[in-house]
Image (tube, rainbow, N blue to C red):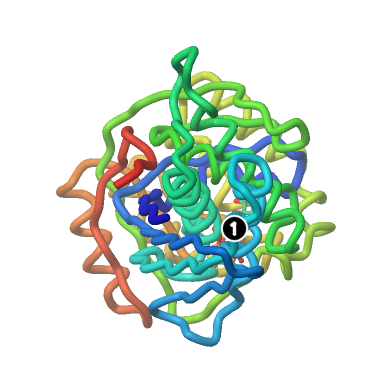
Amino acid sequence: MHGRAAALGAGTILNALATGTGSAFAIDAETTATVELDDSDDVRGTIAEAPDADTRLVERCVELVVEQYGDGEGGTVETESDVPMAAGLKSSSAAANATVLATLDAVGASVGRGPDDDITRIDACRLGVRAAREVGVTVTGAFDDASASMLGGVVVTDNTEDELVARDEPDWDVLVWTPPEQAFSADADVSRCEDVASMANLVAELALEGRYAEAMTVNGLAFSAALDFPTDPAVEAMPLADGVSLSGTGPSVVAVGDRDGLEQVQERWDARDGETRLTTTRTDGARIL
Ligand SMILES: Nc1ncnc2c1ncn2[C@@H]1O[C@H](COP(=O)(O)OP(=O)(O)OP(=O)(O)O)[C@@H](O)[C@H]1O
Ligand SMILES: O=C(O)C1=C[C@@H](O)[C@@H](O)[C@H](O)C1
């Protein structure tokens, strides 16, 4: 029994660690999961780019789907990804969503909104969020990141209830800077994030008014300060981009705006260690391959 699916990375508009309300947008970066189910007793995961990394998230995703839609199968799951791990670009959400969809494909469960479908995409996404909570790779469950990765577009969510509050489909150019370090969400200083809750409430208001670019800039300044990341990249981008923010719990920084302006920001950010990449938003979301 074989299944294969791809899900998207994402950037941050509002980090949910302060209040539980979060907002994220899908970008054109993908993680692909390939699942092979058999009559073995356990699930073994492999991450193509990182053989020593923690595979419990994707293994738990397979187990949860098999428990509900399969027949007790074990097997293997392998991910391949161009979303860098623990860089703030929602690698965990992309891996979980791709794995959940690939496993649903493998057991022959149909994903969609029709009366005969077994599960909707948003409920498939909730399974991945449950797995992320169970293995401890998230603080709030990160339903904001997960739903952006699964549905595409911009989402605003209540991560305390795993509910979608708003969704939109803007078409943006996006610049990403990823420094060479990693920052695991589970290690983030939540109490420092809670200290900037008043700014998070302002960011949520702006996002719900559709003022996404301003929202993300306020988010970036507040959470860079709370989590001790530099604000220089944001200041360099502000005259040339519509919005710029620390993404997730860092260390990546994302900017949105017009292509010309972002190319000029890229020249500035290229002077830093790490990698820059010009990409776009995606509105189509995750898919079975
Ligand atoms: N390609 C992958 N395949 C399998 N598991 C992955 C993959 N990428 C990430 N993970 C899992 O997600 C964990 C990292 O999660 P974390 O939330 O810290 O990173 P992130 O989602 O990139 O960050 P952020 O939430 O700030 O965007 C890894 O330890 C691993 O368990
Ligand atoms: O682990 C979490 O709960 C989160 C991590 C970051 O990606 C945040 O951006 C997100 O809002 C929540």
Q: Which residue is farthest bottom?
A: 52
Residue depicted at x 62% and y 48%: 71
Q: Is residue 124 above or below residue 278?
A: above
In this view of the protein, which residue sits in the foreground, 273 or 38? 38
Q: Which residue is farthest top?
A: 115
Which residue does the numbered mark 1 point to in the structure image? 73
Quadrant the N terminus occupies: bottom left
Q: Quadrant of residue 139?
A: bottom right
Whether residue 128 can be seen here:
no
Residue depicted at x 35% and y 43%: 288
Label 1, residues with CA under 10 Å away: few <14, some 14-19, many ≥20: some
In this view of the protein, which residue sits in the foreground, 208 or 161? 161
Secondary structure at numbered mark 1? loop
In this view of the protein, which residue sits in the foreground, 271 or 139? 139
Q: Position of residue 253 (x, y in %)?
A: 44, 60
Task: Tell me the quadrant of ligand 1.
Answer: bottom right
Residue depicted at x 33% and y 66%: 82
Residue depicted at x 49% and y 45%: 107
Type of residue at label 1? Glu
